[in-house]
Image (spheres, grey):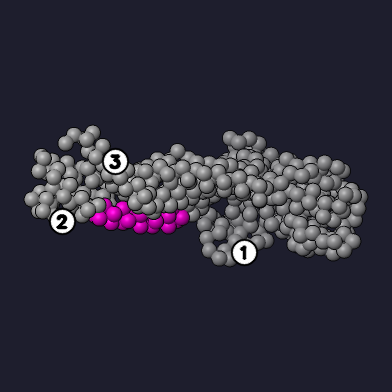
Amino acid sequence: MTIKHSFQTAFTALRTNRLRSLLTILGIVIGITAIILIMSIGRGANKLILSQVQGLGSRTIFIVPGKDSQGPGMSALFVDSLKERELSAIMSKTNVPTLLDATPIVSVPGVISYRGDTFQAATMGASPLLLEILDIYPASGAPFSDYDIRQKTNVALIGHNVEATLFGASSAINQKIIIHGKSFRVIGVFPEKGRVGLLNVDDLALIPYTTAQKYLVGKKYYDQIFARAVSENTVLRTKRDIALTLRELHEIRDEDKDDFHIHTQADIAERVSIITDVMTALLLSVAAISLIVGGIGIMNIMLVSVTERTREIGLRKALGATNRDIRRQFLIEAIGLTLLGGIVGIIFGALFSVTVAVGITKVLKIEWQFSLPLSAALVGIIVSTVIGVIFGLYPASRAAKKSPIEALRYE
């Protein structure tokens, strides 16, 4: 029996029992569909987060007080480790020659109110430099200046959603809003922009950081410092010099005892990739269970098929078919079933992935990119084939071992 004849015989048997064949591959279809969908969503989430992080610019460096998070509460041990002297030290060209500029960030809790209406905004104190880092500028009005920083003036820039919620169709420019119990004059409104980095500009309220420190939160330290290197090529050097400067200022000799941590875009991108890869792997392991169940179902059906076709096996052996020919025929049937299930699963997975991407984009209004890596399709094909071999080998071997005389007598 030639290989070509084995294939023809195997696929003839599959076509003869089409409904049973379709029901048999259902577990494989579901498993492969889940794998394709998970890999697509994982890749899409990775791209979304990385695009948001990279929206802050490849030269941006984030300096955060406290130890790098290695356990609950670790970063809270030194929340006041970044103050004015630290900002002045890293701004010195003697200490960090490749630093272009830096702005402190002061978070302000609470809501914004105007004539009884309230809005839960992300209120931050910063310098005008943050507008350059985020690449956002008021569509109406004007940004605050370094003069406002020095004088600690009560002025604010607000996002599109803040203005729409509190002022409706009216302009917010020169109107007084209440932030944390203090009155602020709105001098600028940002255009509708959505997210830049991990910050939703439309829900943002920005005030001078000096004003936030003195009149709103009453603290002399910063929650973060955003810094920029002079070029992409000097980011790592800038990060190193900042770390050395802060260690010298805090008299730290062992870097494991740092009371601060520094991240670049590359650091954050690496962490995001690790997290999404781990989550994808965990979900894939769950999806693999359905593949195992599908494989067991195929083995069961193949054993039934071997029993039903006992006389056929005996007849083929009587006409000269060898054990190898019989084993190959049934193995091809098993692989054909799983491969068909894999192809159908890839098609369904791609369709569901497109549907999910469109749905997320419309419902959540974020730029979710449909992504179906070639590796996902290859994984689907390879896994299907391997399952066919593993779960088809035993039924095929059992069919090959049947005695032709006993098989011909089988009723």
Q: Which residue is mark 1?
A: 76
Q: Is residue 229 left or right of residue 114?
A: left
How far from the left and from the top, in percent, is residue 142?
A: 85, 43
Quarter placement of the C terminus: bottom left
Q: Amino acid at mark 2?
A: Glu
Tell which of 304 and 137 is nearer to you.
304
Tell which of 274 and 213 is nearer to you.
274
Q: Residue at x 80, y 53 (%)?
A: 162
Instruction: Give me the C-alpha separation between circle 1 and circle 3.
Output: 66 Å
Which tag, 1 or 3, sits closer to the chain's start? 3
Q: Nearer the viewer, mark 1 or mark 3?
A: 3
Q: Is residue 207 left or right of residue 90?
A: right
Q: Amino acid at mark 1?
A: Ala
Let me know if residue 321 is in the magenta part.
no
Q: Residue at x 85, y 49 (%)?
A: 148
Q: Residue at x 72, y 53 (%)?
A: 105
| Whether residue 177 can be seen here | yes
How far from the left and from the top, in percent, is residue 221?
A: 72, 59
For label 2, the SS is: loop
Magenta region, residue range: 281-304
How far from the left and from the top, in percent, is residue 354?
A: 55, 43
For label 3, the SS is: helix
| Whether residue 131 can be seen here | no
Q: Which residue is mark 2?
A: 411
Cβ–Cβ below 8 Å for labels 1 and 2?
A: no
What label sits on residue 130 in the rendered view? none
Q: Which residue is mark 3?
A: 11
Q: Is residue 380 left or right of residue 248?
A: left
Tell which of 195 and 330 is nearer to you.
330
